[in-house]
Image (cartoon, grey):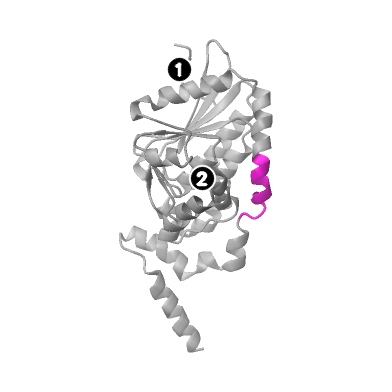
Amino acid sequence: MAWTKWENVAGFDFKDIIYEKKYHTELEGGVARVTINRPDKLNSFTNLTQDEMFRAVDDASHDSLIGAVVLTGAGDKAFSAGGDVGWEATGLREQFYWRYPPNQIVRMCRKPIIAAVKGWAIGGGHHLAYVCDFTIAADNAKFGQNGPRVASPADGYLVAYLTRVVGAKKAREIWMLCRRYNAQQALEMGLVNAVVPLDKLDEEVDKWCEEILSLSPGCLEILKASFDMDIDYMSGSYGQMSRVMYPDWFDSKECKEGPKAFMEKRKPDFWKIRKAEIEAKKKR
C-alpha cells in the first residue's frame, strides 16, 4: 500500500466537517481531505460548516507538504444538497451568501481540489462540485440546480462559470430548468472528469491524487492560478445582479415562499404572490 492511513489533523476539532491528511509513502507528498459530515441533512451546509471548511482548506493551502485536497460528503447518499433550507429559513439567509461562500473557499486554495461525488450534488452542492479543479463521480451521483424551485438566487461567476464547463446552452438549461442528471449524463456533458462504481470511488480518487503528487507542486499551483484568472474576470460581479434587479430580494414574499413551501412539503405558489403584489399596486 503506497499510502499512509487517513488521520485527523491535530488542533482542528470540528463539528460539521472531518479534516484529515495522509501521505504517499513513495512520493512523500500528502493529500488533505475535507468531508462535510452532516449525512442526516444530506451534507447541506450552514454558516458553521462554511467557517470550518474555510479553516481546513486554508490550512491545507499553506501546508507545503500537501499537494492536493479532496472534498467530499459523509455517507453514500449525498456529496452536498447545498445550503440547509431549514437554516436559511431562520432569517440568516443573506449572510449565507456572503460569509466564506464554499465556492470562494475552493477558489482561494492554492492546491488542486478534487470533488469526490457520491449521491446528490444539488444546488450549492452542485456548483461547489463543478468549481473544483477536478470532479470524480460515483455511478450513483446525481447533479442539478435548485434555485428557481425554492426562490434561492445565485448570480455572477457561480452561474457564468458553468458555461466554461458545459457550454452556454447546457448551462442555461441546468440553471434555469432545474433538471436532474445522472453520472453518465454528467460525464457526457463534461460536468465530471470520470465516473466509477461507488465502491471504487476512493480508489479512483487515490489514483488521481497519486498522479498529481508525481508532478511539480509549484508548477501546478501556478497553473491553477492561471486557470482561475478566467474566473477572476467574472468574480467582481458576484451578487451584483441580485442587488440591481431585486435590492430587497431577501425581504420579499417570493423569496420567503420558496423555503417555506419546502419545509411544508408543498409546491410553492410564486405567481399567486406576484398577482397579489400587482393588485396591491393598483389600490395605491
Residue 138, quarter of picture: top left
Span colored in magenta: 228-238
Left or right: residue 162 versus residue 181 is: right
The answer to whether residue 247 of the structure is visible from this angle is: no
For image coordinates 65% across by 50% down, the residue present is 234
Residue 70, position as x, y percentages in the image: 50, 30
Say if the magenta span includes residue 230: yes
Q: Is residue 193 visible?
A: yes
Point out residue 150 in the picture as x, y percentages from the top left corner: 41, 59
- First along the sequence among labels 2 and 1: 1
Q: Which mark is residue 282?
A: none
In x, y percent, where is residue 282? 48, 88
Mark 1 falls on what kind of element? loop
Q: Is residue 158 left or right of residue 194?
A: right
Residue type, numbered disc 1: Lys
The mark found on residue 166 in the picture is: 2
Label annotation for residue 5: 1
* Residue at the extreme left of the image, as rendered: 265
Amino acid tagged 2: Val
Residue located 42% across and 74% down the image: 273
- Frontmost residue, 17 versus 280: 280
Q: The residue tagged with tag 2: helix, strand or loop?
A: helix
Q: How many marks?
A: 2
Name the main secondary structure of what is drawn in magenta.
Answer: helix
Q: In percent of the image, x 48 and y 50: which residue is there?
A: 170
Crowding at label 2, few (<14), some or many (≥20) Cα neighbours within 10 Å?
some
